[in-house]
Amino acid sequence: MLNSLNRRNIGIFAHIDAGKTTTTEQMLFKGGQIRSLGSVDTGTAQTDWLEVEKECGISVLAATTELIWRDTFINIVDTPGHVDFLSEVERSLRVMDGAILIISAVEGVQPQTEVIWHALRKLSIPTLIYINKLDRIGADPYRVIENIHAELSKSAIPIQNIQGIEDSFEGVSFWDGQEQVLEQPLIDQIIEVVSEHDDFILNQYLEGQLISEQLKEKLSLLSKGAEVFPILFGASNKGIGIQELMDAMIDYLPHPEGSQDAPLSGVVFKIDRDNKLGRLAYVRLYHGRIQNRDSIYNVTQGVEEKVSQIRKIQGHKSEDLGELHAGDIAALSGLSHVKVGDILGSDEGVPVHPHMAVPLLTVKVEWEQEEEYPAVVKALQELSDEDPLLDLQWHQEDRELHIKVMGKIQLEILASIIKSRFQLNVEFGQPSVIYKETPKQIGEGLIRYTMPKPCWAVLRFKIEPGERGSGVTYHSIVRKEDLLERYQNEVSRRIPEALEQGLYGWNVVDLKITLIEGEHHVVHTHPLDFAVATPMGIMNGLDQTGTKLLEPMLNFRISVPEQFAGKILHDLSQMRATFDSPNQQEDRMVVEGIIPLSTSMEYSIELASLTKGKGTITTYFQGYEECPEGVLATRERRGINPLDQSKYILSVRKALS
């Protein structure tokens, strides 16, 4: 039976084009998993097996693969680098015991790098930093290290000597801890970082008694504890530094914890489809074991289902394992109800779900033939199971479908996937920015739903603005003697639905709702009266408080030749951006700041045209902020507005009859 000490679960993360897939391909080759190297550019990479990935040359889905190195089984998850597919990265982070963060030696730390880094730190995932592309013109690893210390962590420390740079880059010297192969200044840096966590190491060094093996052992422990972060170097496209990186994965990243004898505990982090096996649920098991034909309980869905097969997937290839042990990752077939994020068995040992990806655009789905409507609905429901952030909105009365996305690249990929998998041609309407609403001030909402009989539900809510990003909090101070518990539970269940459409038609967020008065009638109250009354009471309260619009804001970084500086700064002012003083880097201007999504959606195209491709802009989500006076965005309301109480009651009661 495999010992958990001989296993690693490692995610490969990076900003787009830093070399994740190429690095993974080289690892598979070095580990003997593949006989010849594939290429991202030619569409032959092992982990880019979807047709759309081969065509576009980018990773769209997180791909799992396994290799053996130094008698250790290593599950590797190669994640997408484009910001539009951040949800795939988010789901992969949850199931990793260790990570490799790849940074280009030319571009250095980029916005997506920072987003991933902060998520890794939030989850305390031990991380190796791999500076790639040292053979490229413009590579400057020492500048990148300074960049890492300034933007990521001062506890990141190089553990290799670099032999040459750019055209003369030959490789790295790997420190095995047995002999002094590192230059003394680098040893001094390692001692300095390690001694911040261990006085014994510093004392041994000062007394001249510190041995190299002792230092490496302590560095390994600190790295596995996510307290320090070793930096390695290479040129993945040439296979330079790959073997040393794989050794570091064994030496500096931890093995999975968990007991096979404990009760079952696992999480579904990816859903896929197989022509023969149907729905496949990729599961990271934290405790217990699963065998073919086992029945397992899905805590999230509240159902029990039988596993038909347990398979290891390698691109288009797979094999039946028969059994899945604690600490391992595999795909389960037979679970027809399962969705991404579902907990199996219990949540014991399952990490929290990191929330990085926020869809900022909504689009209407359009199709060619009217009779294709049911098939399009089914296809999008399947895709929403695989990516819950699509948040499919199915308006049956209008026969309309709307989804939420991260950006326009994601729409192109979705259209391609729907075409290849479901043989359906779909198009998307013009993307609209997703705004939100929040109360302007404190107020109360009152509803006395007592006519037409039989009905009786009286509710009074206190509504207060919350801090930005606080979401929605709800509680009741009404005594159960005045309003039965089952009715109070119905009110609580209906609050999210009541907040889906505010005064301007957008979701209402960042508020505190308190039920301060409630009343039922022993004869006239219908079980669903409070389901009807809650939206009317909440909307009455929002009408009293008023709401203000919130818009999504992006952090941005623009780099352009200095002759375009004046024009760019003018454009940024026109787009309502706020930014720091520009930095001069050789013959280029770099400016960073915050900009509204609504004004900058097309700016990457304008920038490329203006600078003839020499200007770049990178962005990532910063948060929602209040719209300035004069900016108004409304969304058409679906259904009857609860503020029109008579019409709303008639509409709902017709549905209840």
Image (spheres, grey):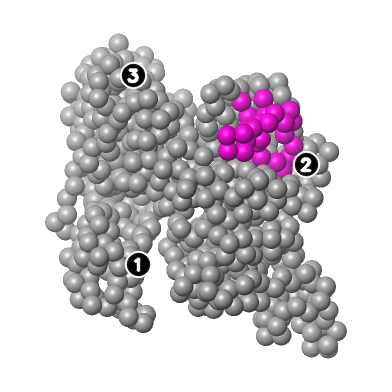
**Tag in front: 3 or 2:** 3
Residue 557's tag is 1
Q: Quadrant of residue 654?
A: top left
Compute the Cα span from label 2 to label 1.
Answer: 46 Å
Residue that extends furthest to the left in the rendered view of this protein: 630
User: Which residue position is annotated with label 3?
Assistant: 374
**Residue type pointed to by label 3:** Pro
Residue shown at the point (60%, 66%) measured from the top left: 234
Membership of 328 in magenta stretch: yes
Secondary structure beneath disc 2? loop
Residue shown at the point (23%, 27%) measured from the top left: 639
524 with respect to 54 (left or right): left
N-terminal of the two: label 1 or label 3? 3
Identify the magenta region.
309-333
Residue that extends furthest to the top in the rendered view of this protein: 657
Circle 3 residues within 10 Å: few <14, some 14–19, many ≥20: few
Membership of 332 in magenta stretch: yes
Q: Residue 267 location in percent, x, y? A: 61, 38
Residue 279's tag is none
646 with respect to 179 (left or right): left
511 with respect to 175 (left or right): left
Circle 1 residues within 10 Å: few <14, some 14–19, many ≥20: some
User: Which residue position is annotated with label 2?
Assistant: 259
Tell me: residue 540, above or below residue 22. above
Q: Residue 71 location in percent, x, y? A: 79, 50
**Residue type pointed to by label 1:** Arg
One can see residue 355 in this view? no
The rendered magenta stretch, by its main secondary structure, is classed as strand
Secondary structure beneath disc 1? strand
480 with respect to 656 (left or right): right
Q: Residue 651 location in percent, x, y? A: 22, 19
**Residue type pointed to by label 2:** Ser
